[in-house]
Each structure stands twice: as structure tokens, then as C-alpha cells.
Amino acid sequence: MNNKGMPHLRVNGERLISSIREMGAVGFDPQTGGRTRLALTDSDKEGRDLLCRWMREEDLDVKIDPLGNIFGVRDGSDPSELPVMMGSHIDTVRDAGMFDGVYGVLGGLEVMRTLNQNKVSTRRPLALAAFTNEEGARFQPDMMGSLYYTGTVGLEELMSAKDDGGLTVREELERIGYKGNETVRAGCYIELHIEQGPRLHAAGLPIGVVEGIQGLAWWTGEYCGESNHAGSTPMEMRKDALLAAAELASEAEKLALRLGKGSVSTMGRISPKPDIINIVPGKCSFTLDFRQFESGLFEEGKREVERLITSCAEKRGLKCYFKKSAEAPPVVFDCGMAGLIERTASMLGLDSKRMISGASHDAQFLSPFCPAVMIFVPSKGGRSHCPEEWTEAKDLENGCNVLLHSVLELV
Ligand code: GLV
Ligand code: MN
Ligand code: MN
């Protein structure tokens, strides 16, 4: 039976929210009010164990792939069909809110629970995915699970990525027991997510139909000058590596403002060495994140960022080393899938708006691989990647109902 036979079917909003809260307690820090489940840490393992238990309780066939991506499959009556896949991620940044990623995974689980409770059988199978290391907060590149899943980057390259302490993805994946050898191929993919930006909340709209995602490029680098005495080294004789990073931060801001059209640049990590009050910093490592939706401007922005990194070193006679640590091109989602989300929202009496995602998501790499789309719900005040991240219960329930009925149209 499809939704034509059950237009009144609805998810259980309370059950969804209670599961989001339970997952949100994993890695919770009462001091900051946030939770931290950096990829492949003990708290990520705890979150994974909870998710796998919930999947098994719904009789989903749990499969883990070689990069630790988790899939839960619900059979359809036609085994020759590829599954309709829902999903997102359960790893977090440091001191995160409880919705980023988790909403898409537990929203998909709530769809499975609703179908099971109402004994709805489908022709196509359904799959729920939790991709490894979407955030890239510990290991770069970000969206590692979907990079591997779609064959965009090879397993060996991703497995050898190291964290700040020199531990590799391979070591940590083996340590937490999530290196599998199975996979599940998607026929199409829908990712439910909080917007993480201010637009839906400001417009008072419950649903965003996501038409595409802006391109992302990350660099990590280091300026190398000379450590020296803070009191006795005249200003004109210094080779201060922190000042080059400071100038780069300011130049990167000017670049984003000059390119405009939503361009954004961020330097989220700057680390002077030796990091002592009375020493001119001889070294300074940094990260830079640049994003833009239009391909031409994205390319120009990337070229300009690399020119700025170099010129900020040259001006001060410093050495500089840098590499691109992640890149995800801008994508435009399948227009048929976007139309489906829009029609479903309208069928449920929910106003929607078409939009481009500012944040990156696994759907970005799934998109060239199979028809993909995303559904957004409002983020209060546009806050995200911080403990203040918030989405109202009704909005969570509405988005999940759009997911349920979009899926029912596809199966
Ligand atoms: C992922 O959360 C990103 O950085 O967009
Ligand atoms: Mn996310
Ligand atoms: Mn995130």
C-alpha cells in the first residue's frame, strides 16, 4: 500500500523527540550544555551502539561497511529493487546541539517505526544510513562516509587520515569495532536536516525544499617565522607567524565580502607556537573554510584563497606550507525529487520555500550517485554547531511527516 491508501498516517512526534533527547545525552557535558561525539571516539561508539540497538528492535537488517557507515534495511516485496535510502550522521562537532545529523537519522528511524507499527509493507526496500565522520571535526576530509560510499575517494586514502594526536581512521575504526565488510546500495536518497541557518525561522515557514548545496573547500596550513624574545626583539626585526595568520583572517573576510553572492570564509583554528606570553610566535598553524554556490565564483574564491595564503607569508618573509584538506563541489539536486518534497509538504498543508543549503551534507556526494534531495526545518535564530542549536518539537514532527509521505510516494 502507498500513501494514496493512507494519507492520514503520521509519525509519532513524542517518540521522535524522546529518541533525539536520548541520543543527545550521549557525550553530554553539563558544563557547556553541549554534547561531543567526535567521529570514532568512545562517545561516537556509544551513539552508534544505541542506534544499532534501535535499528535491530525494528527488525532492520544492520550492515556496516568498511568505513564504518551503518545501514539498517527494511525489506520490500521486490528484492530486485534498490532501496529508498534515508539518512544523515550521528557524529558531532565539539559542544554541539542535539539535532544536527541526528534528526535525519532518527527521523528516518521514526519513519521505519511508523511503518512497522501500522504494518505497512512496501514494494521497494527502505534503508536508513548513518554516515561516518560527516563533520570532519576530528579527521579531515569531512563527509568521509559518503566520499567512500559513492567511490569519490578511495578507502586507503580515507583510512590513513590522522587526527591531531596522530591516530588514524583505520586504528580508531578497528578500536571501536565498526569496521565492517558489507554495504547497501541506494536507489535514491532523502536527507532530513535542520536548516542550521536563519531563513526558515525568520520567514516563519515550516519546511525548506533544498534545491542544492554550496561548494566547500578547506585548507590546513602553517606559517613559519622565528621565535624570539617578546621584550628585546624590535618590531621591525620580527618574523611573527601569528601576524601572518591574523592578516590572512582579515584578508579572507574581505575576499568573501568582495566576491559576495553569499560567499563565506572562516578561520576556525589558529594555533601559535610556542604559545607563550613572552615569545614572538615562530610558528602558527591555521585552517581556512571557504564556501560559495556558483561554480565560477567558487573556483575564483579557491584561487584567491591560495594566493592570499602565500602573499601573507611573503610580506613578512615567512615560509608557509598548506594543503587543501577537503573539497565538495556545489550541487543541484534532482528536480523530480525536489518537486516531490514540495508536493508532499503542500499535501500535508505545510508551507514551504525552495532554498540552497549553506552547510555541507552527505547528500552532496550522494547527489551525482543517485537522485537525492534534502528537507529542511527551521533552526531557532539560525544557531547551529553550538549548544544553543534548537528546533521546536512541532517543526521536527512536521519535517518527519514530509519525509514519511515522500518515502511512501517512492516505495
Ligand atoms: C558540516 O556541518 C559543515 O561544515 O557544513
Ligand atoms: Mn549535519
Ligand atoms: Mn554539522
Image (spheres, rainbow, N blue to C red):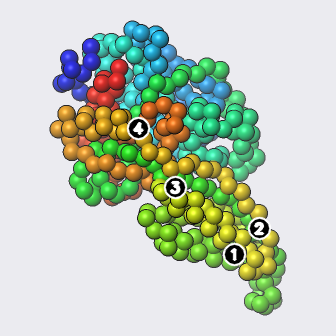
- Please name the residue shown 30% across and 37% down the image: 339
Amino acid type of the residue that numbered disc 2 sits on in the rendered structure? Cys
Mark positioned earlier in the residue sequence (2 or 4): 2
First-in-chain label (1 vs 3): 3
Mark 1, other Cα within 10 Å: few <14 / some 14–19 / many ≥20: many
Q: Distance between the residues labelled 2 and 4?
A: 41 Å
Query: What residue does disc 3 label?
Result: 295
* Residue named by callout 4: 334
Q: In this view, does 137 lie to the left or right of 193?
A: right
Q: Where is residue 28 in the image (x, y as percent from the top left)?
A: 49, 44
Q: Is residue 128 toward the left or the right of residue 287 in the image?
A: left
Q: Looking at numbered disc 3 in the image, what kind of residue is underneath it?
A: Ser
Q: Nearer the viewer, residue 210 or 179?
A: 210
Mark drawn on residue 320: 2
**Looking at the image, which is closer to me, 284 or 77?**
77
Q: SS class of the residue under badge 4?
A: loop
